[in-house]
Image (cartoon, coloured by chain):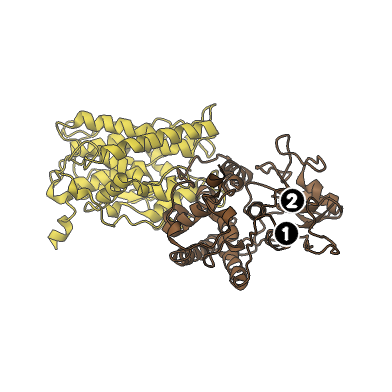
Chain colours: A yellow, B brown
Amino acid sequence: MNMLVDGEWRTDAYQATNEDGEFDRDETSFRDWIQDDPDAEFPADSGRYHVYISRACPWAHRVAMTRRLKGLEDDISLSIVEPVRYDDGWEFSEEYPDPLYGEPYLRDVYTRADPEFTGRVTVPVLWDKERETIVNNESREIMRMLDTEFEGPDGVDLWPEGYREDVDAAIDDIYETINNGVYRAGFADAQEAYENAVEDLFDALGHWEEVLDDRRFLVGDVLTEADVAMFATLIRFDHVYHTHFKCNRQAIHEYPNLWNYTKDLYQIPGIAETVNVDHITRHYYMSHADLNPKRLVPTGPDIDFSAPHNRDRLPADLPPALRADATAADD
Amino acid sequence: MNMLVDGEWRTDAYQATNEDGEFDRDETSFRDWIQDDPDAEFPADSGRYHVYISRACPWAHRVAMTRRLKGLEDDISLSIVEPVRYDDGWEFSEEYPDPLYGEPYLRDVYTRADPEFTGRVTVPVLWDKERETIVNNESREIMRMLDTEFEGPDGVDLWPEGYREDVDAAIDDIYETINNGVYRAGFADAQEAYENAVEDLFDALGHWEEVLDDRRFLVGDVLTEADVAMFATLIRFDHVYHTHFKCNRQAIHEYPNLWNYTKDLYQIPGIAETVNVDHITRHYYMSHADLNPKRLVPTGPDIDFSAPHNRDRLPADLPPALRADATAADD
């Protein structure tokens, strides 16, 4: 990727590693909050907000999934950027235009919010169409806002009372080891940094493989934001992280519980439509020339997210809209 | 790799692809034959020949395996080059010296044989210590010579009467699709060339997976040169070709028959000692900067070639020295 640094567009400032070759992810820049309060600076009004996402990006995927699980499609508009990122960063195209301003690049949306913006131009972006600025570009916070500040038509609550501490602990727990862990492995510049990241990653996957042996979801029988965060990484793992980021000790489809869990979530109504394997694979393999100079995109692996899973054996407390037979029942 | 071109050492002349981005492997250069005939130009005398190999290279592995299966360790000396190949090509080191001349690079052995040598400096090299020249550097031919022109103490014959046409057909069949197929995928410069190679490769693997369902070895119940050629690719597949060459549609350990077949061969007495996973992984990941610029070496996959296999259910006609319990019986 690339950054705006003092108004200059720099293509060499991303994937920054420290002196030990370890990947350090920079903090995101916009951290305001939508609130379910008409007097708030950013009130939770239907139709007021827009999210810019990439179908490739796992951080953006959290937001697209939350929006869909909550049934907020009519309340928050969404648009998609081109999957492959070249020297100018995330860009719009005829197929994936900027629906608000017709800008050519996502960086133009950032400088529209702040002409003095300095930092990484990332997705997701939560945009306020009324004040014409970025509310927030931190995926975990946008996920939480959509979840807690908007009601949604189906009564879906991904941060339910009684589980909140566990959800937050799980999100914390999987962030460094799994969600960012694959990046720590893939963007490492030194063998030891890579090996440490891979060890943390597979230790954590082994832990959750065990947890999921008698638990339908990460914190119990309820689907939560922690599952959204976990799914965004697992669904990309075998196609991208395993090969491109060299996280090849084991594939997710070789873990009985993690693999069935991934398929279980994929088969929740609406989730499959948030997954675009073509965008995912083309993005990673074609955007990181420093990892894959020839930009060839692998054709594997041969796996099927729609295949049967055995997770029905475990109790689940899901609202009707999120049950796998919900779509069929509507027919 | 790199080549000697008109006496000049060129580092840019290997991995040549044609205008469609397809990898074209050059012909090898030295094609003389050892013969089991005292009057031959190169008679099959014990102690006269040396083979230079790399533990990393599948072509060299054919020769090391044949020498070991035939029990020719006392007849033909062998030395190993450094696994990682930098700008000067295959090189010797303190740990892996040139035992004959103390040369620093393998190219020096080539120019010792032919001061005007022009071409790729590859392993294996079959060297005549008496005439001080290269007899042959084509792995298939060296494998055949060691097999048919030397007797060996154990009566091992890898090109047995009654199977010879089938063996040659199998070697032909797996060469372009599998042995060289992984290179056609990995060294492709264009998406279509890569995809064609991968399709040929997995079609062929699928074919042999079926064949091995009721056949212990590629041509029947006898171990042959075809199995040697196949094994040299399969043993490297999951560690290297799957990830580094993007042959990630399926891993060998996900094919029941191919995987058990690989373990079966690995467990033949002496074969495990010809396999060096450290040399294999370091060679590929660190030598091809155009595929893996950071030269990081993956730690996966987590597989065990010594694990049980189910191939004993199929009939095998193996000489006693090659039976898996032979080593144990010697204790």
Q: Is residue A192 above or below residue B190?
A: above
Residue B224 position within the rendered picture, expressed as x and y whole percent measured from the top left: 59, 62
Is residue A82 visible in the rendered image? The answer is no
Chain identity of mark 2: B
Q: Which mark is residue B230?
A: none
Chain identity of mark 1: B
Q: Are discs 2 and 1 less than 8 Å apart at CB?
A: yes
Q: Amino acid at mark 2?
A: Ile
Is residue B165 visible in the rendered image? The answer is yes
Query: In front: A163, or A2?
Result: A163
Q: Amino acid at mark 1?
A: Phe
Residue B14 position within the rendered picture, expressed as x and y whole percent measured from the top left: 69, 54
Query: In front: A274, or A266?
Result: A266
Q: Is residue A255 above or below residue A8?
A: below
Q: Which residue is mark 2?
A: B76
Residue at x 13% of width, y 46% of height: A319
Q: Which residue is mark 1?
A: B150
On the same chain, marks 2 and 1? The answer is yes
Q: Secondary structure at mark 1?
A: loop
The single residue placed furthest to the top in the displayed view is: A19
